[in-house]
Image (cartoon, rainbow, N blue to C red):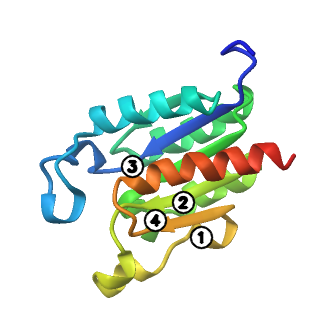
Amino acid sequence: MSITDSPKVLLINGPNLNMIGTREPHIYGSTTLIQLEEQLTEKAKQLEFALTCFQSNIEGEIITQIQQAKANNVDVIIINPGAYTHTSIGIRDAFLSVQIPFIEIHISNVYAREHFRHHSYLSDVASGILVGHGLFGYELALYRAQNIISSR
C-alpha cells in the first residue's frame, strides 16, 4: 500500500499545546510538540497511516482544519482542543458538520484539575476520549484511529 492509499489521520492540537515541553513540565512533561509529532509520524507509518499534524492557538483556524478534512478525505481526526474543550461550540459544530469520527485527547487528567475543566463540549459526540495518559495518550489515540478505520 502506498502512502497515498493509506488511511488519513489528522492530529489537531489547540491553544498553548505548542508550549508543551516548557509549559508546566510537572503536568505536560519535557517532550516538545515537534518531538511528539515526529514520534507520532513514525508510529503512524508503522500503522500504515498518513498522519498530518496541525497546531493553532486560534479557534477559527482549528475549525477551518476540521472543515477542510472533509475535502481532504481524512478518515479520523485526533484532537487535543486544549482550553477550547470547555468553551467552543464552534469546534463542536464543525465536527457535527463534517461527520468525521474523532478522538478527543487530554494529556492531563482534567477531572483532577479545576472544576471548569470537567465539562467538554466535544465528549458526547466523540468516537473516543483519552484523558490523563500523558503524551502516551496520543499513541493510544493512533491505535483507536486504527480500530475505527478497520471497523468500517
- The answer to which of marks 2 and 1 sits earlier in the sequence is 2
In the drawing, does residue 114 fall left or right of residue 55? left
- Residue 69: image x %, image y %? 65, 34
Give the Cα separation between the discs numbered 4 and 2.
9 Å
Mark 2 or 3: in front is 2
Give the Cα separation between the discs numbered 2 and 3.
11 Å
In the drawing, does residue 143 fall left or right of residue 42? right
| Residue marked by disc 1 | 123
Give the image quarter of residue 51. Answer: top right
- The answer to which of marks 4 and 1 sits earlier in the sequence is 4
Q: What residue type is labelled 4?
A: Thr
- The answer to which of marks 2 and 3 sits earlier in the sequence is 3
Mark 4 or 2: in front is 2
- The answer to which of marks 3 and 4 sits earlier in the sequence is 3
Quick one: SS at disc 4?
helix
| Residue 53 in view, yes or no | no
Q: Which residue is drawn at 75% across and 50% down?
A: 148
| Residue marked by disc 4 | 85
| Residue marked by disc 2 | 104
| Residue marked by disc 3 | 14
Q: What residue type is labelled 2?
A: Glu
Quadrant of the snapshot with the N terminus: top right
Circles 3 and 4: CB distance less than 8 Å?
Answer: yes
Quick one: SS at disc 1?
helix
- The answer to which of marks 3 and 1 sits earlier in the sequence is 3
Q: How crowded is mark 2: few (under 14 residues within 10 Å), some or many (20 or more)?
A: many
Q: Residue at x 15, y 54 (%)?
A: 23
Give the image quarter of residue 134. Answer: bottom left
